[in-house]
Amino acid sequence: GYGMVWGAAYGALFGNQQRGSLWRGAAYGLAQWAIGFFGFVPALQVHRPAHKVSLVENAINVKAHVVYGVVTALLVEELGQQTARGPEPWAERLGTRVG
């Protein structure tokens, strides 16, 4: 649920912007890490805050969040480039089947 909300927020904020999506996604992932590990995580007491864990653990978490942001940006960009298509009538789908 937590990651899904962040992904939906990215789509709502940047869904119509196609240029620079990789950098925007990386920055978004980094911001998500900072907000989460300096705000939500300590407030909910589900993990130690970022300033109390090792540099290696922080580096792994930052990298994971940056990858998440880039992948989210790529998915939002791809979905934005697809044409809107509604469901085809049943008879039309049946007529186009092969095999």
Image (cartoon, rainbow, N blue to C red):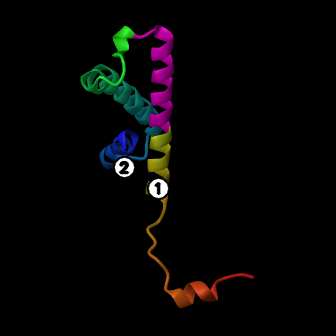
Amino acid beneath label 2: Gly
The location of residue 27, given as percent across then percent down, is 39, 29
Q: Is residue 86 magenta?
A: no
Q: CA distance from mark 1 to mark 2?
A: 9 Å
Q: Residue at x 50, y 28 (%)?
A: 64
Is residue 59 or residue 30 the one in the foreground? 59
- In the rendered structure, the answer to whether residue 4 lies left or right of residue 57 reads left
Q: Is residue 94 above or below residue 82?
A: below
The location of residue 43, given as percent across then percent down, is 24, 24
Amino acid beneath label 1: Leu
Mark 2, secondary structure of its residue:
loop
Q: Is residue 44 above or below residue 85?
A: above
- In the rendered structure, the answer to whether residue 21 lies left or right of residue 12 reads right
Task: Identify the residue under disc 2.
Answer: 15
Q: Is the C-beta separation of discs 1 and 2 under 8 Å?
A: yes
The image quarter containing residue 96 is bottom right
The location of residue 83, given as percent across then percent down, is 47, 65
The image quarter containing residue 84 is bottom left
Is residue 78 or residue 30 the one in the foreground? 30
Q: Which residues are magenta?
A: 53-70
Q: Residue at x 34, y 22 (%)?
A: 37
Task: Identify the residue under disc 1.
Answer: 79
Task: Name, please, the residue furthest toward the front.
Answer: 45
Task: Name, please, the residue furthest toward the right.
Answer: 99
Q: Which quarter shows the N terminus?
A: top left
| N-terminal label among 1 and 2 | 2
Q: Is residue 65 above or below residue 75?
A: above
Q: Is residue 54 magenta?
A: yes
Q: Residue at x 51, y 20 (%)?
A: 60
